[in-house]
Image (cartoon, grey):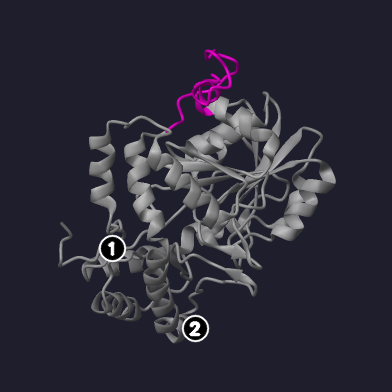
Amino acid sequence: MIDLSTIPFNHPHLAANELDYLAEAVRGGLTSGDGPFTRRATALLRELTGARQALLTTSCTHALEMSAILLGLRPGDEVVMPSFTFVSTANAYALRGAVPVFADCRPDTLNLDERLVEAALTERTRAIVVVHYAGVACAMETLCAIADRHGLALIEDNAHGLGGSHHGRPLGSFGRMAAQSFHVTKNAQCGEGGALLLNDDDLVAGAEIVREKGTDRSRFFRGQVDKYRWVEIGSSYLPSDVLAAQLTAQLEEFGTIQARRHRVWDAYHAGLADWADAHGVTRPTVPPGLAHPAHLYYLLMPCLGSRQGIIAHLAERGVRAAFHYQPLHTAPAGLRYGRTAEGGCPVTEDVADRLVRLPLFTGLTDSDITRVIEAVRSYTPRTP
């Protein structure tokens, strides 16, 4: 139950068919992976993203780990990525012994700054990982060209980006592989879950093996081999069909989810425009030609003190807000396992101190939205 006196930061959407599908999956007895709901969810996901193939996983983290295995990364290989991202982006590659190379983000979209990427490359670089922050696309034309020019794999961490696009092309369809998240905080969710999108047909067979503990079990169940064996390294990345049942209901309702989230995002953006301009607060930037999925709404406050101040101010008024990523390049594990590209990440360090996220979920009512906007507008930011 939601505490009606407090507007939470997040509350998961409940799709109309969700409970019925969960019951159907359990009653049907096919609760392990690759059952009927796995196939349905996969088809819906391919339709949404335009990916050649999609494999459901137990998390976006595991999808990223699979990408690292499929790239054949070895100790000492390097992977360029933003410092302003969740720890899973780096962990997946560090687990294979590769070195995350942290580059700075752009001050407008907060995405990996494409102008800094080539300077971060060395003869050991094997891949570039991009993160579409808040579901706003990175500069994909430039980044794809860099990857092609240097013979590197481009991987999309598309945890925020389902439903977003770059000049009409869905996010998740640009990289050789892309990782999706269906964590409870995402637009479509099944509590914990993810997917690996494959845009290279040569990777499909190997990805199936990696996901099935390094065995050719999928081929066995298709009748392509008479027994399945351990043929490669892998792990248990295949989710239960119960989770896939929940995800199927969410993906079937994705249009409704998106319309409701955009309604909230648009109301915040319009309702806070003059307040933000008057107080030196920056609202999200969406460059022309990019469509975002209303995954999150953030404000960049003038300084750390004003960020902490508004979070406390909103809490006093029954509104839960949150800050976001802390720079990976200065984190203890980032210092131990990665390295920072030349020039450092000053923009990342700056925005990480100033960013605050507002509540955004489908269940927000008109009065909730008004209450959040009024609570924000009643705060006078501190100056640096």
Residue 87 appearing in the image: no
**Neighbour class for label 2 at 10 Å: few (<14), some, many (≥20)?**
few
Query: In the depicted view, which residue is nearer to us: 284 or 63?
Result: 63
Which residue is painted at 39% across and 57% down in the image? 252
Q: Position of residue 317 (x, y in %)?
A: 22, 71
Q: Is residue 225 magenta?
A: yes
Compared with residue 207, is residue 361 higher up or lower down, i.e. above or below? below
Query: In the depicted view, which residue is nearer to us: 82 or 314?
Result: 82
**Magenta stretch: dominant secondary structure:** loop
* Residue at mark 1: 320
Which residue is painted at 59% across and 43% down in the image? 53
Q: Which corner quadrant holds the N terminus?
A: bottom left
Task: Tell me the distance, in whole angstroms, between the alpha carbons under discs 2 and 1.
Answer: 23 Å
* Residue at mark 2: 277
Residue 200 appearing in the image: yes
Mark 2, secondary structure of its residue: helix
For this view, does 28 lie left or right of residue 293?
left
Which residue is painted at 36% across and 34% down in the image? 240
* CB-based contact (under 8 Å), mark 2 and mark 1: no
Mark 1, secondary structure of its residue: loop
Compared with residue 13, is residue 152 higher up or lower down, i.e. above or below? above
Q: Position of residue 254 (x, y in %)?
A: 41, 61
Magenta region: which residues? 211-238
**Neighbour class for label 1 at 10 Å: few (<14), some, many (≥20)?**
many
Q: Is residue 308 magenta?
A: no
